[in-house]
Amino acid sequence: MKIKGRSISKGVATGKALISKHKISFLGAVDPTTGIIVDKSLDVYEEEITNCVLIFPGGKGSTVGSYVIYQLKKHGKSPCAMINRRADTIVAVGAIIAEIPVVDSLEIDIIEDELIRDGEEVLVNGTEGYVELR
Amino acid sequence: MHLTKEEERIYGGEEGWTKKKAMEILVAIGDINSASKLIPIKSAHVSGVSYKTIGEAFEFINSLEGTVKVKSTLNPIGMDIERWDKIGISGEFATKQTEVLAAYKKLGITAECTCVPYLLGRMPKMGEHLAWAESSAVLYANSVLGARTNMEGAPSALAAALIGKTPFYGLHQTENREPGIRVCVKCDIVDADYSALGFLIGNLVGNKIPVIELTSSSLPSKDELKHLSAAIGATGSVGMYHIRGLTPEADAIGVPAEKIEIEKGDVKKFYEENEEADVIAIGCPHCSSLELQHIYELLRAEGKGRKVKKDFFIFTARAIKQRMQEVVKKIENYSVKVICDTCFVVSPAFERYRCVLTNSGKMLRYVPLLCGGAKAKLCKTEECVRKAF
């Protein structure tokens, strides 16, 4: 199923979904050297985001979070793509400098409508602004 | 967002990878915030410079090429460029920090590392558009100078510097500079009270721009406005404030319906903590020439020939230290260290203390988060000096 959205950061990638219902503050929530979520308040606590398609409502917190996303990429521990309900500038800027595809504002809310579950495959086309559930 | 032909070309990568990345950042931010276009800026102020906060992400800055299109300045780094070994910075950190600084210099950014760019060189004028990071400077520029900037992040200010433009939304637009809440201050305030007031306001107003109503005998100096700006920026998410009868746009604004009151007791509470401090730090934001002069006079009055008993650091911009050489020499005769290019919070050199005494509301917020578990206690400037002996 193909769902239209808005292009935030360019590129195309396919991976297994990892879904959080919470906004994520990358500075403090993710260990940039391991890709593991270390924020106990998150529903994805102790999950590894490496090579996943990280699906979450959006970012929050310090703007240094953008550089944490970049560090994840440098360590080979970044998600392969991200989907947001509403991307914020921290995630958008981090994804652009790290060259990770991001799409937001999908015409169907895949988090709320539970159209996808953890581990299912999803394609993110950040260049054209759509996702495809496999 | 509408792009001109030239902007389209940059976005398409015709002027290289660096400008393409910078343009992609600006376009994404513009789209997220429903901006209609990009507008030219007069200057940029870039944060994310201390190796303590950005770590390996400096590889990104190192990968950029070309030069910035407007006058661009840098926030404090993690050490005093000339005296890093004297304040306990490791050689390894100094090497990394020097590389970060070199990467910014290569882009044509002025290596005057300070959080008070408005005290050096050219002061932004009323109505000018800027792209500044560093929340205290953003609040000062918008509120006190009447310039216009959103609260930029480290990479977005850098992107704006490289393109010379920023997306037109938020505080760049007159209609978004209207206050949403009145803050009535019921007591006279002075010196560090402005830090306490800002700390309270940031916590209370959320993202609504406050219009502050002071008593008729509270006449804030530029330095007090600097401390108010810094404290609001530290605890709040709002990028400007008005002060009725004082700040440049305050005459043109309406009276919001929502109102909060600040009483004497609310401000007094900040001074009640009884923790014994083991260090004193002044200069967050960086001290002005006047503040240096004032601290010297306090030291002279209190010291009577004695040196301070506690570690005492003053932080300022290198150009201000140079301008005030004689005063700085006299201050250092009291065993007080005047440090440049960095500050207590962004340098790893000051993580060995238990409790720091300061006149800064910004430090009150960030020391407990970023300084190895130290506490911070607010004091008036005079009291900070008195407690040092």
Image: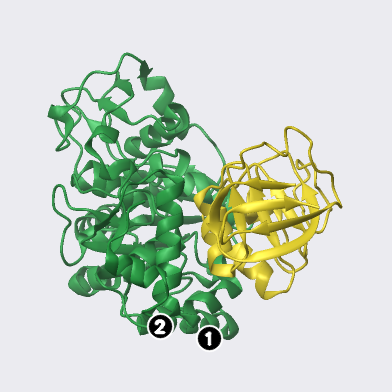
Please state if B202 lies on the left or on the right of A36 as rendered.
Answer: left
> In the rendered view of the protein, which quadrant contains the C terminus of chain B?
bottom left
Q: Which residue is mark 2?
A: B65
Give the color of chain B as drawn. green
Image location of residue B26, percent across then percent down: 40, 59
Q: Is residue B113 visible?
A: no
The amino acid marked with disc number 2 is Glu
Give the color of chain A as drawn. yellow
Please state if B166 lies on the left or on the right of B356 as rendered.
Answer: left
Mark 1 Cα within 10 Å, few/some/many (few <14, many 20+)?
few
Image location of residue A85, percent across then percent down: 62, 41
Image location of residue B162, percent across then percent down: 34, 71
Residue furthest to the top: B257
The amino acid marked with disc number 1 is Thr
Q: Which residue is mark 1?
A: B95
* Mark-to-mark CA distance, 1 and 2: 21 Å
- Examine the rendered structure and indicate whether residue B105 appears above or below residue A44: below
